[in-house]
Amino acid sequence: MTDRDEDLIDLDAFAPADGTRIKFQGRTYAVRNVADIPAEDLFLILRAEEELRGKGPGEQLRMGLRYMGILVPEMDPATLGQLSSRQVLRVMQEAMGLAEVPPVGADGPSGSPISSPSSPDSTAGPGARSGA
């Protein structure tokens, strides 16, 4: 197999961009964008709501801290252990909001602020229909 430029997809060009940051105990941490999380970890996080349902508060917090370790890999385990369930939930909600699929186009189905022009028949005066 040859390594020609036209056959090369440079994945380094898609390296994670700076995204959301959180501040905890005076230190700032980057929160990974869900689009930059490896697939195996992303599937785990996307199933989080389903996985947490029916679990007790302790188990929910333990699982939430696991998800936080994926979303905020710079945060050491000791610091993660100091987060409250409310803080974990807030970070997860913000991160998952980034995963939402944007609407089609800029503003929904059309994406255009200008409406289509009227057909010639609709702008012609009475009795001026084409073919009449």
Image (cartoon, rainbow, N blue to C red):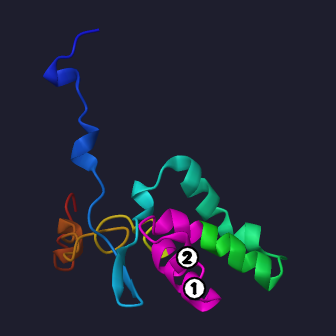
Q: Which mark is residue 78?
A: 2
SS of the residue under disc 2: helix
Q: Is residue 82 magenta?
A: yes
Q: Is residue 100 visible?
A: no
**Amino acid type at image mark 2:** Ala
Q: In this figure, which residue is indicated by the disc labeled 1?
A: 82
Over which residues does the magenta segment extend?
Answer: 67-96
Residue 74 or residue 103, whichever sits in front: 74
Callout 2: few (<14), some (14-19), or many (20+) C-alpha neighbours within 10 Å? few
**Amino acid type at image mark 1:** Gln
Q: Residue at x 37, y 68 (%)?
A: 109
Say which quarter of the image contains residue 75: bottom left
Say which quarter of the image contains residue 126: bottom left
Q: Residue at x 25, y 32 (%)?
A: 9
Q: Residue at x 60, y 63 (%)?
A: 45
- Where residue 79 sits: x, y (%)? 51, 79
Callout 1: few (<14), some (14-19), or many (20+) C-alpha neighbours within 10 Å? few
- Where residue 91 sits: x, y (%)? 50, 80
Label 2 – label 1 distance at C-alpha: 7 Å
- Principal SS element in the magenta part? helix
SS of the residue under disc 1: loop
Q: Is residue 14 magenta?
A: no
Q: Residue at x 16, y 74 (%)?
A: 124
Q: Is residue 72 left or right of residue 41?
A: left
Contact? badges 2 and 1 (CB < 8 Å):
yes
Residue 5 or residue 57, whichever sits in front: 57
Q: Is residue 20 left or right of residue 13?
A: right
